[in-house]
Amino acid sequence: MSGFIIGHERRFRRRANMNFEERALAFPCQGAWLYGILSMPAETASRGVLIVVGGPQYRAGSHRQFTLLARQLASEGIPAMRFDYRGMGDSQGAIQNFEDIGDDISAAIDQFMAAVPGLKEVAIWGLCDAASAAAFYAHRDERVCGLALLNPWVRTGEGAARAYLKHYYLKRVFDPGLWQKIARGRFACKAAGHSLLAMLRTALQSRQRPDTTDQAPAVHASSSAMPLPEKMYEGLNRFNGRILLVLSGDDMTAQEFSDLIATSRQWRKLLRDRKIRRHRLAGANHTFSQQEWREQVATWTRDWLRSW
């Protein structure tokens, strides 16, 4: 079954005072119908952006970030498509884990390129686990020329414990509100102590093992069996396109990714060797909830797309 564009002129909408149009798209993937929105400039570039949704979200994104990003890019001549993968939003099928949406991304790129005449290559834009999913997929599709990765998800129990100890508990120690609670007897010291000790034990486990990132292909029979950080490393190591990395300044997921880089010689080498543009947005939270943060991310995305 081939994909199709839903509707006709009545469903082909030009936004008031804007130089782009939006189309509803439907396309098949593994027996299910997926739904998306194409933001189409009046004159399109040969490079477009596919926005992959992180779970559990749908194509609008948190705070409508995906909608606003697609429209801003389209208004500046860059076609953008966002869609719901299987089991999310309006799309059919059983819900998929972010590690298993390669078929969905491939089907979306097929439809994106069919719907936009002249489109030759695509950059994938993903936040959180969608960034990880994009990293897993990109090296397998020569149509993918770039990856925009925002607060990539590399969560492990040990990594999360280290990040909380370093960035949360240390901050709490200097919080006057904590000491006021303790002085008033309103703080559960025993429970907090047990939690802290458990986190210390988890964090220390990783120090007893060497960095095996460079051994990943030999140690694991398949990429699906790899721990999440190693699987992501493997994907990025095989990808030869451009990479934009954006990390929020007030986000534990971003801190965990930064700590991974800081403690791994192989990750640092990978990021040095690849064509990567890096940004850190001070004060921003995980989903860029403030307008100024979303606009900054959109500007960085546009500038990066025009940089080659």
Image: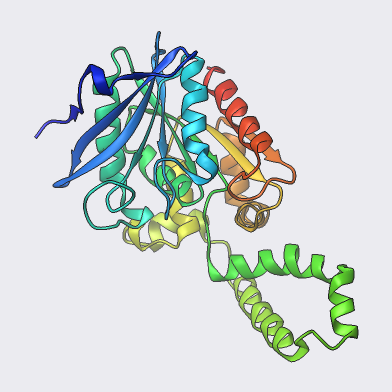
Is residue 17 shown above or below 23?
A: above
Q: Give the answer, above or below, for where 13 lies relative to 128.
A: above
Q: Is residue 253 visible?
A: yes
Please say if 87 is above or below 194: above
Q: Residue at x 65, y 54 (%)?
A: 251
Along the viewing direction, whichever of 134 and 85 lies nearer the viewer: 85
Residue projecting furthest to the top: 43
Depth check: give the residue in front, 70 or 224: 70
Quadrant in the rendering for residue 244: top right
Left or right for 63, reference 194: left
Residue sitting at the far bottom: 190
Coordinates of residue 223 in the picture (x, y in percent): 35, 56
Front position in the image: 97 or 67:
67
* Rendered location of residue 178, percent (x, y): 84, 75
Q: So how many labels did they put on this image?
A: 0
Give coordinates of residue 28: x percent, y percent.
Answer: 18, 39
Residue shown at 64%/73% (left/top)? 203
Looking at the picture, the colour scheme in use is rainbow
Relative horizontal placement of residue 75, taking residue 278 as reference (left or right): left
Using residue 303 as the reference point, say whether residue 187 is left or right of it. Answer: right
Residue occupying the point 84% across, 80% down: 181
Q: Residue 270, how many percent across, how many down?
A: 56, 42
Quarter of the image with the N terminus in it: top left
Q: Residue at x 47, y 45 (%)?
A: 131
Res. 215 in view:
no
